[in-house]
């Protein structure tokens, strides 16, 4: 499990360093998000990397969704992660997610 988490965080960080915006199904766990931010802070300002912006959308927290997650099911919603140099602003409201990007 630790190897899988490290591979996931490594994949995300490698693509963010390449100035890519990533959108994927599900959301990061609080631990994964914390570890990603921690690893980002370790490499910030190296190779002109300025940090990341993270937002998850459509997270459900009702009993049925929590039960599905505990049984190994997928998390609902999606996550957007991008380099801070490209993602200028992320706004969330109950029905949509707006991402302002540009160089």
Image: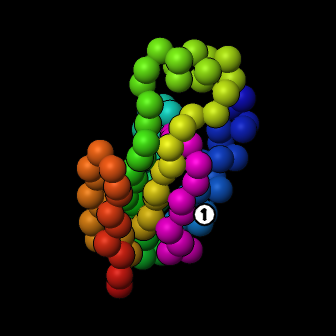
In reply to whether residue 21 is colored magenta, the answer given is yes
Label count reads 1
Q: Residue at x 59, y 66 (%)?
A: 15
Can you say whether 53 is above or below 8 in the image? below
Q: Is residue 54 above or below residue 35?
A: below
- Taking depth in this image into account, of 85 and 44 the one nearest to the observer is 85
For image coordinates 44% across by 31% down, the residue present is 60
State which quarter of the image contains the N terminus. top right
Q: Could you say which quadrant of the image residue 2 lies in?
A: top right
* Image quarter in which the C terminus is found: bottom left
Please provide the residue range marked out in magenta.
Answer: 18-28
Residue bearing mark 1: 14
Image-based side of 102 in relation to 93, left or right? right
Q: Position of residue 7 (x, y in %)?
A: 69, 47
Name which quarter of the figure residue 88 lies in: bottom left
Q: Main secondary structure of the magenta part?
A: loop
Q: How is the image coloured?
A: rainbow
In the displayed structure, 37 sits above or below 14; it is: above
The answer to whether residue 48 is magenta is: no
Residue 46 visible in the shown view: no
Considering depth in this image, is 56 or 68 the residue closer to the camera? 68
Q: Residues within 10 Å of mark 1 (few under 14, many from 20)?
A: few
Q: Position of residue 80 (x, y in %)?
A: 46, 57
Q: Nearer the viewer, residue 75 or 21?
A: 75
Q: Residue furthest bottom?
A: 103
Q: Residue furthest front?
A: 95
In the rendered structure, the answer to whether residue 91 lies left or right of residue 32 reads left
Assign a secondary structure to mark 1: helix
Between 76 and 45, the one nearer to me in the picture: 76
């Amino acid at each position: 499990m630790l190897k899988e988490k490290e591979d996931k965080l490594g994949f995300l960080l490698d693509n963010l360093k390449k100035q890519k915006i990533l959108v994927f199904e599900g959301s990061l766990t609080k631990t994964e998000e914390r570890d990603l931010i921690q690893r980002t802070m370790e490499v910030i300002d190296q190779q002109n990397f300025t940090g990341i912006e993270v937002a998850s959308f459509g997270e459900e927290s009702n009993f049925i969704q929590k039960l599905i997650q505990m049984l190994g099911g997928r998390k609902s919603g999606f996550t957007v992660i991008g380099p801070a140099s490209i993602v200028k602003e992320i706004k969330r409201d109950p029905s949509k997610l707006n991402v302002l990007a540009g160089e």
